[in-house]
Image (cartoon, rainbow, N blue to C red):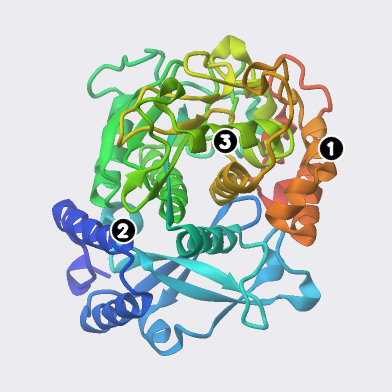
Amino acid sequence: MPNDLRNFLALSYEELEELNLAAKQQRKERVSVDVIREERLKYLTDEKRIKAVTLLFSDLEGRLHMLDYDKKFLLNSWDNMTFDGSSIRGFTAQRESDLRLAIDWPSFYWAPADYFGSGKVLVFGEVIDKDGSAYGADIRGVLKGFAAEQYASNGYTLNAANEIEGFLFNGTDAERRYNETGKFEYVNTGGYYHSLPGDPLRQFIDTTAEVQRAMGFQNEKDHPEVAPSQFEINYGYGEVVQAADQIQLYKLICRQVANSMGLSVSFLPKPVVGVNGNGMHTNVSVSKNGRNIFWDPKGEEKMSKTAWQFIDRILTHGNDICLMLNASVNAYRRLDPHFEAPNQIKASATDRGSMVRIPIGNEKSARVEVRSVGPDANPYMVMLAVFKTGLQGEIAKVKNLRQAERYLPDNVYTAIDNFRAASWTESLLGADVKGRYADLKQASADRCPKLLGTFVKAPEVQYHHEVYNQFLWNQF
């Protein structure tokens, strides 16, 4: 059908940015959900050029899922939308498969039509159990509940910003074909901060940054990273649930742009050995009444006692939560200090081999940087683990806790054992969800070589949760 017969919504990037920044401001000001819901329903009713609403949610391992609902259907059924949870890894069993999706109306995004299709808008959803309660394996919902509780009880706003690294490889299906090719092909070998204007890596970074800007990310800087064909595109901090949503959108945008160029983006923590891996440095702070409570100009490293207690709790539980921050077999290749990656359970203002770093900051930017996070981890689980541990975990009576000689696991099996044995992880996830998550990680590990060796094995990629393909898994 000729395109001129269609009249679907396709806004300019400037219009998109205005709409997304306005929605972001509503979230920041905590405008009533009821007010926003009525505003969005009216918008969807009045905007005749919208044909569908894409509803996004994440599974237990953090893989993003999307359903398109016809707009007219959604307007009539937005409060009773069901889906089959048995087909989602880590969700319900087949005999009890029906789950509901509730729309999180403030988490509404307008996306560029050239990468997401015309006539569509995006919104995040919350998974609801059959009895109407929040579904325990929907970690986004768990995180949202925890953040709301902290705001109601203590007046705390939980803030986060992530530095997410990735690789750009040749071919549109590089990860899923790794079991055939056994290698990834760089598109650029320029290195840190270096890429010629107009080459594939620079073109990819520029285009991705444009899409992010249009979607209200409020970009800060972008550049090629240390390893060949590696990139990082940074953007502003946000409230914790929105920050985790933006991680999912960031990865989705990167994949869309790369695919349109005939290329692939990989967020495997260590897709190529011998060069730096991909990290997701997670910068966090807590504010109250608009004031950053991690800042103290007279404190050690100009950080408050509250901030140091936050750090000490994370260090105490470093091995307990390692599997939540490093969720795959491949992630344990990255935890190698020879490539600027952390493996030491300590805190430092300078040593980038430390699990926690204290960046130079001021009253606005004072923060804690948790460096031992892989970009393939469930972002909602990462935020839950970091904030709940930092605010409510225990502090070990260990001499010189912040500089003690302790190390993160160098393999996923040890991390699984630590996770299963820790009572704290049950406090974070509940016994049932903790067991499901551990079983999923065990299943992936058991399909992979127990000893990592010196080169990436095909099963590390083939059975990776972000690359998950039912056909490939059934080859095992």
Q: Is residue 437 visible?
A: no
Hey, what amino acid is under mark 1?
A: Asp
- The quadrant of the image that shows the N terminus is bottom left
Q: Secondary structure at mark 1?
A: helix
CA neighbours of label 2 inside 10 A, class few (<14), some (14 to 19), many (20+): some
Say which residue label 2 marks: 28
At horizontal 31% and vertical 29% (from top left) the residue drawn is: 362
At horizontal 45% and vertical 33% (from top left) the residue drawn is: 304
Say which residue label 3 marks: 309
44 vs 348: above or below: below
Q: Is residue 135 visible?
A: yes
Q: Which comes before the other along the chain, label 2 or label 1?
A: 2
Tell me the CA gap for discs 2 and 3: 27 Å
191 vs 219: above or below: above
At horizontal 41% and vertical 13% (from top left) the residue drawn is: 189
Nearer the observer, disc 1 or disc 3?
A: 3
Hey, what amino acid is under mark 2?
A: Lys
Relative horizontal placement of residue 166, taking residue 261 as reference (left or right) = right
Expressed as whole percent of the image width and height from the top left, the position of residue 370 reads 53, 31
Q: Secondary structure at mark 3?
A: helix
Say which residue label 1 marks: 417
Using the rendered view, name the quadrant where residue 397 is placed: top right
At horizontal 38% and vertical 14% (from top left) the residue drawn is: 192
Q: Secondary structure at mark 2?
A: helix
Hey, what amino acid is under mark 3?
A: Gln
426 vs 128: above or below: above
**Proximity of marks 2 and 1: CB atoms separated by less than 8 Å:** no
325 vs 157: above or below: above
Using the rendered view, name the quadrant where residue 346 is placed: top right
Expressed as whole percent of the image width and height from the top left, the position of residue 392 reads 62, 48
Q: Which comes before the other along the chain, label 2 or label 3?
A: 2
Expressed as whole percent of the image width and height from the top left, the position of residue 118 reads 28, 64
